[in-house]
Amino acid sequence: MAISFALPIYAQEQSAVDPETRQEIEAAGMQFVEPYNKHDSAAVAALYTQDAVCLEDWEGGGLLVGREALEKGFAAGFAVSFPSVVGKLDQMYAIEDRIAAISEYSVGSYHGHKVRIYARDANTWKIRMEFVTEAQLPQSLASQPAATPSDAAVNAVCPVSGNRIVGFIGKPLYAQYQGKNIAVCCNECLTKFQNNPDKYGPLALKNDSANEPMKRPDQ
C-alpha cells in the first residue's frame, strides 16, 4: 500500500521542470504570438522542427507533417484573415529530454487547447509535436471587445487565478467593475468574473486574488 501512494509523488518529481527551462519554454511560446498576429507564416513555421507533426482535432482540420507543410497551412489560414491569437500556458512537464506544455488559446470566436512537445534544436527549443483542439466560444464571450495596448487595468494579477497579467502568452481579457477595467488571464477566469463580479471585483481593486485552481484541459 505504501508503494502505491509513493509512485505518484515520485512521478511528479521526475516530471518537474527546472525554473531556467520553464522560462525558456515560456519565452518560446511567447515568440509564437507576434509572427502569428502579423500573419508571417514563414516565421511561425520556423518555430517548429524540420520534421514537426501537428494534428488539428476539429472538423476540417488535419495532420500536417514537416515545416514546409506547416508553413503552407499557416499561409492558407492567414489568407482568410485569421484574427489575433490570445493564449496562456497552463501546465508543463519534463519527458526525458523533451518538454510537454499544455496551453489554452482564443482566436476570434473560437477557443481551444494546445499540447506541445518541445525538443532542443541547436541552442533553442522548438515544437516537435503539437495537438490542437478547437470549439466555438459562448456568445457572451465571443462578443467581448478585444483588448488594446491602451486599455489600462487596475490590477496586475488575475483576481480569479492569481496568474500575472503581464508575462503570459498574448493579451489579457477585460471586464468592467465599478467603472474600472479589470484584467483577467483567460476565458475561464473571465466567465467566473462575469458570473460573480462582487466576489472578484473587490479583489481586483486591491490587486489580490482568490487563487482558484484552473480546470485542466482533460477535466
Image (cartoon, grey):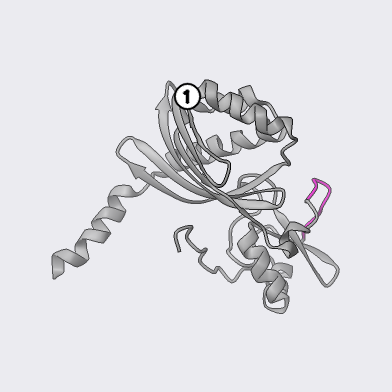
| Quarter of the image where the C terminus is located | bottom left
At horizontal 57% and vertical 46% (from top left) the residue drawn is 59
Q: Nearer the viewer, residue 130 or 47?
A: 130
Q: Which residue is mark 1?
A: 66
Q: Nearer the viewer, residue 29 or 158?
A: 29
Q: Secondary structure at mark 1?
A: loop
Residue drawn at x 58%, y 41% is 60
Residue 8, given in percent of the width and then of the height, sits at 26, 60
Residue 173 vs 25, above or below: the answer is: below
Residue at x 40% of width, y 28% of height: 120
Q: Which residues are magenta?
A: 147-153
Which residue is drawn at the image coordinates 72% and 48% (left, top)? Answer: 108
Question: Given the current orientation, which residue lies at the most extreme bottom position?
Answer: 198
Main secondary-structure element of the magenta-colored stretch: loop
Q: Is residue 11 above or below residue 191?
A: above
Q: Is residue 22 left or right of residue 141?
A: left
Quadrant location of residue 182?
Answer: bottom right
Q: Quick one: label 1, few (<14), some, or many (20+) residues within 10 Å?
A: some
